[in-house]
Image: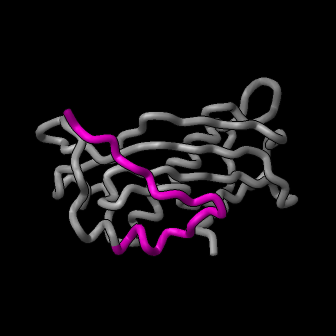
Amino acid sequence: MNFQITFHTKWSDFDPNRHMRHTAYNDYAAEVRVRFFQKHGLSINEFAKLNIGPVLFKEETSFIKEIHIGENITVKMELEGVSKGIERWRFNHQIFNEEGKLAAEIKVYGAWIDLIKRKLTAPPKKFAEIFKDLPKSSNFIEIELKNKK
């Protein structure tokens, strides 16, 4: 089962060509990630208390169909990969237009950063339970971490 949210798009999401700005797609994907973690007890304030935050290494967007001004969209999120200790992760977001047709796909690869040390870190153990609740993509993999030298 997917984690998904339907959004009412807003005027500022669109460009002079009357279709959605390229960066608006990524903004909606990020909003879905934030809402997933909020739903599972990790609000932005909770992240701050834990001195941890997400950091993206790569964000890749494929545009398939236009979304026009006034359309609503549905954004689905799946976990495409995660390391054993949840240190690294990869999410896949699919954005659908009102007709239910795939309009864009966004893949993000990231990790967790200690907000005090400003270094990559492993998250607290409770993150493992939250990641178990994430729907997995059909091409889900375990991400292997390279050994530190």
Relative to the observer, which residue lies in front, 102 or 67? 102
Residue 112 at x, y percent in the picture? 30, 47
**Quarter of the picture holding the N terminus:** bottom right
> Residue 128: image x %, image y %?
33, 69
Q: Residue at x 82, y 26 (%)?
A: 17
Front-lying residue, 67 or 53 = 53
Tell me where residue 2 sits by quadrant.
bottom right
Image point (63%, 58%), residue name: 139
Q: Which residue is painted at 46% across and 61% down in the image?
A: 35
Q: Vertically, is 18 above or below 10? A: above
Q: Which of the 4 image quadrants contains residue 120?
A: top left
Q: Position of residue 143 (x, y in %)?
A: 44, 52
Judge left or right: residue 100 versus residue 147: right
Magenta stretch containing residue 143, yes or no?
yes
The extreme left residue here reads: 117
Q: Residue at x 19, y 33 (%)?
A: 149
The extreme right residue here reads 99
Residue 5 is one of the magenta-drawn residues = no
Of the pair 113 and 32, the residue shown nearer to us? 113
| Residue 63 percent coordinates (x, y) | 75, 37
Q: Is 66 situated above or below 82?
A: above
Magenta span covers which residues? 129-149
Label count reads 0
